[in-house]
Amino acid sequence: MLSLLLWPLDAYRPARLAVAECYNELASFLGSVYDLTTREETSRRRPTPSLWHRLAQHHQYRIRRAVEHGWQAIANVRAERQADSAGARQLVVLLEHADLLIARTVALAEHLEAQTVTIGNSACFLRGISCLVDLRSAESWIASLLMRRRSLTVAHARAKWREMERLPHYLADCLDSSDPNDHFLLAQVAESASVLESSIETASLLRLGLSPENSSDPVLTTGHPEHVHQRLKQSRQRPNLDQLAANFTFSSLTLRHAVRVSVVCGTDVGVILLLHIDHGYWLLLTSLIVLQPHVSGTLRRGLERVGGTIGGGVLAALLAIVLHSQLAIAAVLFPLALLSIAVMPVSYAAFAFFLTPAFVLAWLPYSGDWQLALVRIVNTFMGATISILAMKFLFPIYERERAPAFLRASLTADRGYLEQLAQAWRSDSVSIRHLASARRGAGLAHNDTEESLERLLAESWPRRLPFTHFATAFVTYLRRFAQSVTTLTTLRGESEWKQSRSVQSRLLLLQQRLLWLENQFENQRPADPSPWPELGPDSSKALVLSDNHPGERQLERMERQTVILQRQLKALRESGGLLESSG
C-alpha cells in the first residue's frame, strides 16, 4: 500500500537514477578540472602533478563504474518488461552521450594540466575556460532533471538547450586561432556543448513524456543500432553456464569461498549446539557477514563488525539500565534503526554501532537486563574470530598472488586502445564505436586493477610492504597512459601529421614497450632477455611542427610514461612481493 499510494509506480526509475548518476559524476569531474585549472589564478599556487594524478584516478574510476551500472540497469529493466519503449531508447541515448562526454572531459583534463591559467594566457583561452562552468551546469541540470522532474515545462527545456546552442557561436571567433593549444581547447568545449544540446533535448523529452518522433537524434526515432543491442545483451544479468562450469575448479575464487562458507557455517552450528549459546544465531550471522572472498575484505569487515558491536554494546547496556518502559524503548528504537541505515553506505562500523543497541533493546527479556548486550558482544567476537581463522587456514588466496594478472590485463587493454588509435590514423577513418569500445575496455581493466590494489594495500597495512608504493605508482601511470590516448582520439584533422612515418613509428614503439611490460608479468623472470624498445633515429620529430603542438606534446608524455612504468616495474622486482625473482 505504501508503494502504490505514496510513490507512483515507475518501472524505469532505477535505470533513470543510474543514468543521472553518470551525469552527476561527469559534472563533478569537470568541476574538479576547472578548479585545478584556475587554482594558480586564485591562490597563486600551481597545482602539483600529484593532484592531477589523483583527479584522474578518482573521477575516471567513478565515472566508468557509473556508466557500467547504467547499462546494467537499463538492460535489467528491459528484460523484466520484455519490450522496448521510447523511454528506454532515450536512456540509451543519454548513456551514449555520457560516454562521448567522458572522452571530451579526459582530453580537457590532459590538455589543461599543461596549460594552467596564467596572466599570459590569450583571451580565447580564457574564454574557453569560462565555458567549462556552463558545461558543468548543463550536466548537473540533466542529472537533477532525471532524478526530480520538478516543474519542468517545454519553455524551461528550450531555454537550457539554447544555452548550449550559444556556446559554439560564442567561441566561433576563436576557433580559427593560429595557436594550436587554444584551438584544441575550444574545439573540445564546442563539441561537448553540441553533445549536451542533444542530451538536454533527450532528457527533457523523457521527463515531459513527449514523443521523440520529431527529434533530430536518429537513435530516438529508429531502433537501436547493432552495437547498442550487443551492449545491452552483455549487460543483462542472466544465468551463465560457461561461467558456472569455469567455477567448478579448485583454482576458482568463488568455489573456494563457497567451500569456506560451508565449513564455517557447519562449525558455527556445532559450537552453538555444544556450548548451548544463547542467541547463537548472532554468532552464525556474524560469521556469514564477516567472511568475504578476499583476505583483505574479511580482515576489514571483521574489525569493523567487532569494533562497532563493542561500542554499540556499551551504548545498549547503558540504555537498558536507563530505559524502564516499553514506550521509551520503542521511542529510542526508531532513531537507532534510522541512523544505522543512513550510515551504512558510509561506514559499516558505524552501521554496526547503531544496529547493536537496536537489536539488543528489541530483544530485552525484561527491563534493565544489560547482560544481553554482553551476549551480543561475545557472539559477535566468536563469529568474527571463526571467519578470520577460516580465511587464514582454509586455502586462502592473497591479493599479491592475483595482482600481477590485473596489472597485465591493464597493460593489454592500454595496448589494444593504442592499436585502435594507430589503425584509425593510418586509414584516416576514425571508427568512433571501435575507439569507444577500446576506451571502455581500458577503463574497466583499470577499475579492476585499482580494486585489486586496494585489497593489496589492506592486506599489507600492518607492515606496509615497500612494493605497495611502487604498485600504486604503476597503477596510476597505467590510467594516465590511457588518458593520453583518449586525448589523441579527440584530435581532429592533422591527417598529414597522423599518417607521417615518424608518428606511426612512435606509436609502434609505444605498443612494443607496452608488450614488453606485459611479458614481464606473464613470465615473471628476473630479467627479460629482449632489450627495452628505444626510439630510432628517424622517430624523434614529426614534420616541422612546433613542440607545443597538442599531438606532439601527448606523444612525448606517453613516451615518458612508459619509461616511468619500466622504472616502477624494476622497483617492484627489487622490492619483492609482486614480482619475486624465480632464479
Image (spheres, grey):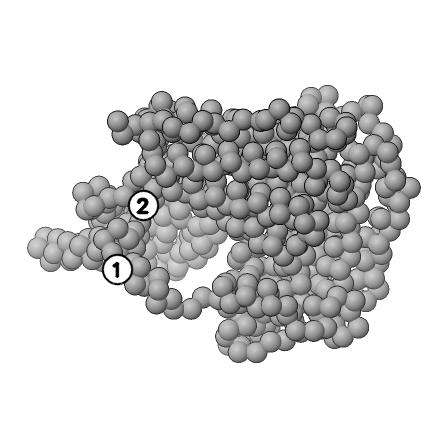
Q: Nearer the viewer, residue 329 or 1?
A: 1
Is 388 placed left or right of 270 in the picture? right
Question: On the image, which quarter does residue 330 sit in?
Answer: bottom left
| Label ID, residue 294 | 2
User: In this rendering, is residue 405 above or below 204?
Assistant: above
Eye-nearest disc, 2 or 1: 1
The answer to whether residue 432 is visible is yes
User: In this rendering, is residue 88 above or below 113?
Assistant: below
In the orientation shown, which residue stands out farthest toward the left? 274
Q: Nearer the viewer, residue 336 or 322?
A: 336
Instruction: Give the secondary structure at mark 2.
Output: loop
Q: Nearer the viewer, residue 288 or 435?
A: 435
Query: Could you tell which of marks 2 and 1 lies nearer the N-terminus?
Result: 1
Q: Nearer the viewer, residue 507 or 187?
A: 507
Q: Looking at the picture, which amino acid does disc 2 mark?
A: His
- Where's residue 183, x and y in %? 81, 38
Separation of marks 2 and 1 at Cα, in angstroms: 18 Å
Query: Which residue is depicted at the point 72% across and 42% down?
Result: 491
Query: Which residue is depicted at the point 34% across and 34% down?
Result: 524
Q: Kindly identify which residue carries mark 1.
A: 248
Q: Looking at the picture, which amino acid does disc 1 mark?
A: Phe
Question: On the image, which quarter does residue 552 sit in?
Answer: top right
Query: Which residue is depicted at the point 47% across and 27% down?
Result: 532
